[in-house]
Amino acid sequence: MSVIDKPTEAGTRIVDKAQYAMAAFIGVVGAYILYDATTLEDGFADQPVQPYAFPYAVGAVLLGLAVLLAIATARGDVPQAEEGEDVDLTQPSDWATVAKLVAVFAVNIALIDWLGWAITGAILFVGTAWVLGSRTLIRDVGVGVALSVGTWYGFYSGLGLAIPAGVLDGIL
């Protein structure tokens, strides 16, 4: 039995208000998505399922989940901490690692227009892997290049979205 689930002296339960807050938040988001879906215009008239069907489905599912979470909370269901978690909560945060990750991300933002995603995406992957402890530079570069070039082609060719090619414009 968790601390939240223990009966008090009078026999009443302590209610996990955070779960109710989460249910309310999910409900508000779901309601907003449903409202926003009503403002969408008709899409392609020849399609059996219109583009606005997806937000209706997402909003309805979120509202349903909010109701189910509120019911579960009212019945006394509380989340249990994961016992296999490998984070030592007694240690302080490693702000140096966070600062290094922010620096790697800032370099990516600063160079993406000039170098393009295929290069800066690889730099982002390699830099992040290095900051988080990887010391296999050759493998990291190979994986980073494969992921960044693959995502560039996926967005550019597959989805028709132009992401910066940078210095590789005309080569990719």
Image (cartoon, helix red, strand yellow):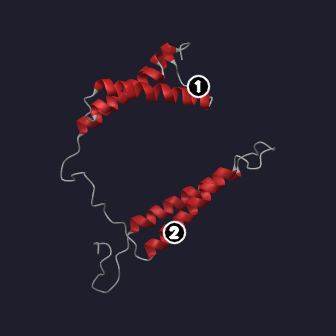
Q: Residue at image x 48%, y 70%?
A: 70
Q: Where is residue 75 shown, x and y percent of the image?
A: 44, 77
Considering every residue shown, the one lying at the far left of the view is 90
- In front: 158, or 3? 158
Position of 132 relative to 46 (above/below) = above
Residue drawn at 52 percent across, 19 percent down? 165
Give, as a three-letter code, the residue at label 1. Ala
The N terminus: image quadrant: bottom left
Counting from the top left corner in percent of width and height, residue 110 is at: 42, 22
Residue 91 shown left or right of residue 118 in the figure:
left
Q: Amino acid at mark 2?
A: Leu
Q: Report how far apart the C-alphas of labels 2 and 1 lie in the structure.
A: 41 Å
Is residue 109 at all visible to an observer of this figure?
A: no
Quarter of the image for the C terminus: give it. top right
**Secondary structure of the residue carrying numbered label 2:** helix
> Which residue position holds label 2?
68
Write down the residue under mark 1: 162
Mark 2 or mark 1, which has the lower sequence index? 2
